[in-house]
Image (cartoon, rainbow, N blue to C red):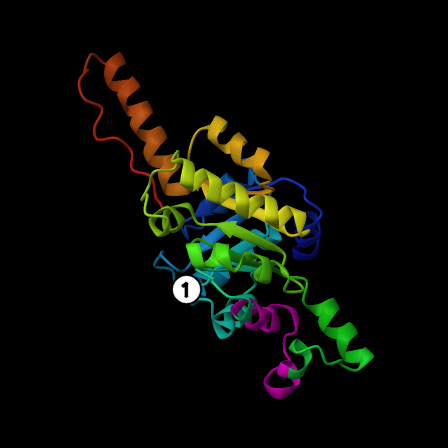
Amino acid sequence: MNSAQFTQRLRAGELLFGTLIVSPSPMWPVAVQESGLDFVFIDTEHIALDRAQVSWMCQTYSRMGLPPLVRIPAPDPYEAAKILDGGAAGIIAPYVETADQVQALRGAVKFRPVKGRRLAERLAGGPFEPTLEDYVRRRNTNALVVNIESIPAIEALDKILAVPDLDAVLIGPHDLSCSLGVPEQYDHRDFLAACETILRKARAAGVGAGIHYWGTAEEQARFVSYGVNLLIHSSDITLVRKHLREELAAVKKAAGKGGPAGPEAETLQI
């Protein structure tokens, strides 16, 4: 699947599955390719990856048919353009709270390489020449996704969803729970109500609806019932921790070396 196909399927409401990839190891892509994912999520907001590493990862996963969505450090159109130049299939902008932020990102993602006054006029509703409009539309098939993870973002959600060319919104559960005053209480009624509002509004607006979550299959299914069609499940490091702990405990038991299996695997909550 290429970036254009991914964006089309996302906007069409097809359920797409991904995971957070932390490791830039060259051994990782083949293992990930065999897991049944539709795309990968690479985070540069919280994970220490440099620009060359991210570009290598994007180029590799793209050629394996796993479109890479990259979260940039801030909702900055210049950061978005850098990541897209490196080969990303789409960008995720963190902690977006206004429609103006989405408009600026729209310019970087959907109208590259136009900049400056010409871009500002186009974003304000002015026309391009037909040849230029056709060029930027054919060239820029990357996905524009924004994180909704605060009370102000929910309050501005209708205006955010009305921005043309927005492909999806993505809930950031950890930050959202903190903004709601119920940190890491992912079964709290206020958190679940906020998620349902975000997801249902997005789908009603014809925009993809996503969440990055690490819970049980039943919990994931609940979000799908709310409207999720972009599901980022857990992360490579969290899954390795969990399964290594479980398998080592089984080996120790079989070898007669029972006892504590070690501390519970921590979840990478970003």
Which residue occupies 68% across, 79% down?
Answer: 122
For the record, the magenta segment spans 101-120
Q: Residue at x 36, y 52 (%)?
A: 179
> Horizontal and vertical percent for residue 103?
58, 70
Nearer the observer, 209 or 231: 209
Residue 183's spot in the image, x, y percent? 31, 44
Dominant secondary structure, magenta: helix
On the picture, is 268 further left or further right than 110? left
Determine the image quadrant of residue 43. bottom left
> Of all residues shown, which one is farthest toward the bottom?
117
Q: In this view, does 73 lie above or below 261?
A: below
Q: Circle 1 — which element?
A: loop
Residue 36 appears in the picture as rendered: no
Please tell me how crowded label 1 is: few (under 14), some (14-19), or many (20+) other residues with Cα within 10 Å: some
Q: Would you name the residue on which mark 1 appears?
A: 73
Residue 83 in the image, given as x and y percentages of width and height: 51, 66
Total count of labels? 1
Q: Is residue 103 magenta?
A: yes
Q: Which residue is drawn at 32% across and 47% down?
A: 181
Quarter-of-image position of residue 265: top left
* 40 vs 160: above or below: above
Residue 256 in view here: yes
Q: Is residue 199 magenta?
A: no
Identity, as a three-letter code, of the amino acid under mark 1: Pro
Q: Where is residue 201 in the image (x, y as percent from the top left)?
A: 60, 48
Is 223 left, or right, of 21 in this rendering? Answer: right
Q: Residue at x 48, y 40 (%)?
A: 193
Residue nearest the observer in this picture, 151 or 64: 151
